Amino acid sequence: QVNNFITTENNSITGKNVDIPLILHESTLTNLVWLKSPNKFSDLPKRKLLSHVLAAKLPNENLWDHYIKFIDDQAEHEKFTDEDIINLKYNPIAKELLMEKTYGNPDYISFGLTQEILKGVKERNQEELRQANEKQKEDQQMIMNQKDEEMKRLQIDLDTSKKNNKEIKDDDYKLRSKIYNKKLSIIAKSSKVIVYLLTIMSACWSVFTLIYDIKGKMLYIILTAVVGVMPRIIGLMKPCTRKIMEKCKNKIWEGILSNSNYKDFERPDK
């Protein structure tokens, strides 16, 4: 029973010509483990592929050592500034550009290549700075747009609230006006009833007086004038009121003219 495994990245010592090698390559062991339980790491092949792609974009140790040695040699002859050395050695973009321009071959390393790498590093730094500034502007614009939308929403809510308050006030005013108009209508009708009653009472009193207390011609004229003028003073001469008053006056004059002492008397309103 084997409790320990030995893994390596060197394919030359993994024993490809034997059925059961003593040393396993790390990729072989990874594949065996993944095949045992593929559901636990379903995205492992994709991650491995991405890892290999990213590794292919970076220089290997041999290429990088030649590159660093060339830069140090050129720096001794003062062909690079301190800023150039920092960009060439420590900027991650320099590694990518080194692989792109040499294809992993250290024989392509030259002073002209380092100048191209410096130029590419500066251009990418400027591009990243420009993108960062644009992103910052977009974020600021988005924040301003959100504030504008919030202000518009608050303004809409305020306008809606004012409109609702105005509608409530209008409804309250209409209700109050309706109540006041109803009260005024009741008062007007009550006043008319009172006027009608007073008119009828006055007419009855006049008839009673004319029948039982006729003293002279002036009394009839005064009573008739009072009965005829009173509704006009009050200002409620409705058609119904006029008809009632005309009937009352006619009754009064019929009583007066039926008296034999006043046969030759003429009605002043004729």
Image (tube, rainbow, N blue to C red):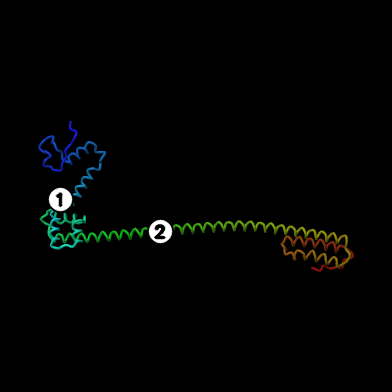
Of the 4 image quadrants, the one containing the N terminus is top left
Q: Which of marks 1 and 2 is in front?
A: 1
* Label 1 SS: helix
Residue matched to label 1? 61
Instruction: Establish if 14 lies above or below 87.
Output: above
Instruction: Looking at the picture, tell me which residue is in the foreground, 126 or 39.
Output: 126
Instruction: Looking at the picture, tell me which residue is in the foreground, 233 or 260.
Output: 233
Instruction: Establish if 136 lies above or below 18.
Output: below
Residue 103: x and y, percent? 14, 54
Residue matched to label 2? 147
Q: From the viewer's perspective, is 181 left or right of 6?
A: right
Identified by mark 2, the residue type is Lys
Residue 37: x and y, percent? 24, 37
Identified by mark 1, the residue type is Glu
* Label 2 SS: helix
Residue at (13%, 62%) from the top-left corner? 77
Q: From the viewer's perspective, is 72 left or right of 200?
A: left
Residue at (81%, 69%) from the top-left corner? 268
Q: Where, by quadrant of the figure, is residue 121 drawn?
A: bottom left
